[in-house]
């Protein structure tokens, strides 16, 4: 008699689109009752908690199959994983207590336990989030209902993040990026404070062309998405990432974003970069191979009053105006780049290219030192919260006068402002738009109505004004009009009109109307 066959349950793996759709649906719990700038933090922290729990569960089940009931060996193996997750911090533990009157407090305790068990990687990450907050989540009854709904949303089988159930290596990191993108898109002006559109981030990464073994730094890190994009240009994980972010909630997003992308050892500091830089070596500004940022445009009250006495001498080329911190970030970034080989890529408003006074003097000094490599004009309405066009400045410290590459005393201007995909809320750089910019930058060549390679003498002749139309002529010549031919056509049309009027008059007379 044949043995009965064992029924095998096939695991249907969820894909990226399904995860993204379910994550966005989970936001319905808060949408309309909590400000998006606040509820994004709760959703993203919960995604992080659920991910940790599901990965922990998957690994526990794997070791359980291997070691049976030997819990000691199982736990010993579990402690060697990327992180440790105490029982009271696991999603299932909280879900079972979703009806408790103090559910907000229980979630806070769970987050504290995660930090305590993983201090090297996650210490302080949740200090800016409170699931028991009446101000953000409402009074007890309403708050408990929302948290219960949130737990039920993430208990959906479609949000099972166990590695054995997801389709793709970085599906959770991508899902996190998807949510940040959506939140930024809906947050108006605040969106630009924590997220750079992915296409712009990819463009910056390709222009800077990072290499294995390099140290990469973002002094205005936001949610760290730009840093991650630059790192993604390097095959493998032979790089070191550093960043600093002034907003505590956004710093939390950055730490979680790194972790979800499998980048455990990035050093991300919380604090004001311009006034209290945290990344120091031997009491001096730490040096990096790649420095990249999308700093806040024209930041007011950035700390100009103390800049002249800056202990790190970042403003020796001049102190930017107190109401516009653009050059404060640029000068900090240049001083953070390795003197012999460091590269800097920074997104700026167009005023940086031509404003005078102290900014004009700083700009002149940077050009005279042959540090500026390229100016790239971008389309308008690319960034969250502002429709103004921006530009990318690329600085290269290997170009310093009297040092390496002294012969490269040129600046490449690229006008990419007219090539993009138009959107309802925002415009978008397409793949071939990015490729054209990068190709032109690497070949350093002039293209008709698109790019121009200017000498430093030409820039000096333009009073160190970097306004792109001074160098890239995009004027379209109008077709020459033959006035004589146009007049003949008008005369012909008037003759035909006179004939038609005469015919109309005869017909009206025949009908007895005239």
Image (cartoon, rainbow, N blue to C red):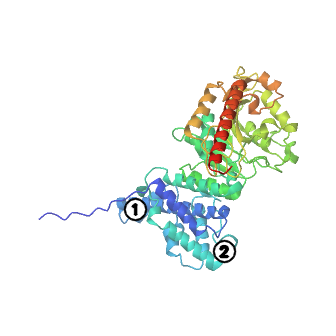
Q: Nearer the viewer, residue 265 or 188?
A: 188
Q: Which mark is residue 243?
A: none
Q: SS of the residue at dot 2?
A: loop
The answer to which of marks 2 and 1 sits earlier in the sequence is 1
Tell me if I can see residue 315 in this picture.
yes
Disc 1: which residue: 61
Q: SS of the residue at dot 1?
A: helix
- How far separated are the C-alphas under marks 2 and 1? 38 Å
Q: Residue at x 43, y 60 (%)?
A: 58
Q: Nearer the viewer, mark 2 or mark 1?
A: 2
Q: Residues within 10 Å of mark 1 (few under 14, many from 20)?
A: few
Identify whether 99 is placed above or below 489: below
Tell me if I can see residue 289 in this picture.
no
Residue 490 on image: x %, y %: 70, 31
Q: Nearer the viewer, residue 265 or 461?
A: 461
Q: Residue at x 39, y 59 (%)?
A: 63
Q: Residue at x 55, y 39 (%)?
A: 431
Residue 184 on image: x %, y %: 64, 55
Figure quadrant of residue 188: bottom right
Q: Residue at x 69, y 51 (%)?
A: 192
Instruction: Give the farthest residue toward the top.
Output: 407
Disc 2: which residue: 138
Residue 42 on image: x %, y %: 61, 64
């Amino acid at each position: 008699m044949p043995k009965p066959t064992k029924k095998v349950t096939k695991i249907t793996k969820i894909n990226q689109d399904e995860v993204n759709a379910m994550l966005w649906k989970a936001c319905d719990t808060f949408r309309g009752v909590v400000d998006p700038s606040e509820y994004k933090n709760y959703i993203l922290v919960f995604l992080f908690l659920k991910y940790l729990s599901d990965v922990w569960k998957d690994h526990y089940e794997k070791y359980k199959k291997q070691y049976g009931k030997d819990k000691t060996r199982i736990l010993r193996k579990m402690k060697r994983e990327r992180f440790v997750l105490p029982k009271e911090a696991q999603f299932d533990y909280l879900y079972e207590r979703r009806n408790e009157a103090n559910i907000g407090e229980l979630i806070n305790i769970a987050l504290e336990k995660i930090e305590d068990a993983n201090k090297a990687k996650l210490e302080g990450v949740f200090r800016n989030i409170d699931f028991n907050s009446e101000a953000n989540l409402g009074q007890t009854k309403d708050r408990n209902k929302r948290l219960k709904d949130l737990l039920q949303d993430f208990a959906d089988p479609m949000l099972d993040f166990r590695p054995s159930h997801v389709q793709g290596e970085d599906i959770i990191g991508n899902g996190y990026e998807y949510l940040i993108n959506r939140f930024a898109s809906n947050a108006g002006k605040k969106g630009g404070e924590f997220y750079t559109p992915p296409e712009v981030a990819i463009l910056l990464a390709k222009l800077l062309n990072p290499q294995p073994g390099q140290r990469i730094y973002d002094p205005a890190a936001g949610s760290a998405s730009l840093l991650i994009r630059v790192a993604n240009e390097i095959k493998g994980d032979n790089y070191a990432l550093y960043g600093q972010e002034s907003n505590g909630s956004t710093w939390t997003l950055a730490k979680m974003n790194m972790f979800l992308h499998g980048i455990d050892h990035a050093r991300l500091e919380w604090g004001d970069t311009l006034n209290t830089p945290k990344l120091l070596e031997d009491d001096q500004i730490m040096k990096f191979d790649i420095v990249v940022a999308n700093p806040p445009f024209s930041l007011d009250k950035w700390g100009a009053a103390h800049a002249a006495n800056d202990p790190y001498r970042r403003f020796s080329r001049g102190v930017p105006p107190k109401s516009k911190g653009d050059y404060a970030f640029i000068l900090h970034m240049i001083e953070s780049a390795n003197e012999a080989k460091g590269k800097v890529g920074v997104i700026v408003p167009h005023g940086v290219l031509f404003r005078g006074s102290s900014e004009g003097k700083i700009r002149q000094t940077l050009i005279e030192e042959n540090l500026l490599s390229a100016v790239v004009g971008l389309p308008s309405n690319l960034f969250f919260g502002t429709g103004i066009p921006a530009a990318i400045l690329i600085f290269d410290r290997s170009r310093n006068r009297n040092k390496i590459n002294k012969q490269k005393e040129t600046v490449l201007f690229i006008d990419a402002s007219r090539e993009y995909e138009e959107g309802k809320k925002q415009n978008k750089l397409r793949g071939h738009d990015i490729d054209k910019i990068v190709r032109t930058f690497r070949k350093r060549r002039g293209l008709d109505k698109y790019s121009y390679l200017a000498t430093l003498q030409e820039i000096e002749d333009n009073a160190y004004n970097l306004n792109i139309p001074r160098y890239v002529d995009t004027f379209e010549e109008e077709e020459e009009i033959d006035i004589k031919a146009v007049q003949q056509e008008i005369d012909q049309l008037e003759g035909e009109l006179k004939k038609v009027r005469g015919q109309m008059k005869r017909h009206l007379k025949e009908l007895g109307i005239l």
